[in-house]
Amino acid sequence: MANSITVKISEEEDIVTARQKGRSIAKELGFSVVDQCRIATGISELARNIFLYASTGSILIQTLTDNNHSGIEIIAEDNGPGISDIKLALLDGYSTSNGLGMGLPGTKRLMDEFEINSELGTGTKIIVRKWLN
Amino acid sequence: MTVPIIKLGHYLIITIQTELTDDMAVEAQNKILSQIRESEAKGILVDLSIIDVIDSFMGRVLNDTAMMARLMGAQTVVAGIQPGVAVTFMELGLKMKNVHTVLDIEQGLELLKSLE
């Protein structure tokens, strides 16, 4: 059951589209309603960060199969300004946009795996995964 | 697309009927605050039963709106938060401040009456 979709993020409504697509793929995979909510919320945070900091970017949502378990992978990518201090950005309550600073650390808690790569002036790529038990 | 606000006695009832974009949420906040003043509302009741995502932005708008309403003398009651939303809200690390919560609109109206 390979499934993959890319949502371009360039307008505010794209945040809603991305999380809706993510939820429907998560549902199709058999994730519980609570997990669907975690996944949709994580996508919402990642998509908003793209919109807020980089203006444009993309969210790739795809199904994962690894030996005997399956899951969902979300890749959020942009060519924005990049994050100068990733450790700080992952700290609860730290924000450079006058926000709550819960987006990134919160998303990390909602998902099973979280990888972040960011280079100043080049962009940011965040990969998150959630596995079906 | 805007969020409908129904006036019922001293209360404003806001039933969110569609998934909100950030702009819609901020617009709803402004509309609620101006209606509190116009109608001298003592309480607002927000039905979130169809909302299946409250991310950090929505959480902040909700808290801010309740705080602003409080400053204007109105209590805020939120009804119908789904189980998944409750779990996610906690895990995101969000806090609910200045907000009373109930299961449904009926309980919300009773609570608003008791708060007066």
Image: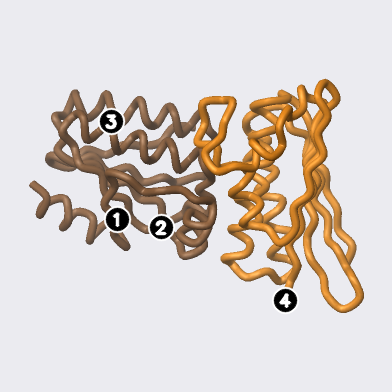
Which residue shows up at 64% across the image and 35% down it?
Answer: A48
Residue, disc 4 = A133
- What colour is chain B? brown
Quick one: label 1, few (<14), some, or many (20+) residues within 10 Å? some
Q: From the viewer's perspective, is the residue at label 3 or at label 2 nearer?
A: 3
Residue, disc 3 = B68
Q: Earlier in the sequence, mark 1 or mark 3?
A: 3
Disc 3 versus disc 2: distance between alpha carbons?
A: 21 Å
Q: Amino acid at mark 1?
A: Thr
Residue B111 sits above or below residue B12 on the image = below
Which quadrant of the figure contains the N terminus of chain A? bottom right
Which residue shows up at 41% across the image and 57% down it?
Answer: B81
Q: Earlier in the sequence, mark 2 or mark 1?
A: 2
Which label sits on residue B81? Answer: 2
Mark 1: secondary structure = strand
Q: Do the numbered discs 2 and 1 sit on residues whose CB atoms are within 8 Å?
A: yes
Q: Which chain is orange?
A: A
In terms of depth relative to the viewer, which is nearer, A72 or B43?
Answer: A72
Residue A98 sits above or below residue B107 on the image = above
Describe residue B42's horizontal placement relative to residue B84 as left or right: left
Q: Do the numbered discs 4 and 1 sit on residues whose CB atoms are within 8 Å?
A: no
Q: Earlier in the sequence, mark 3 or mark 2?
A: 3
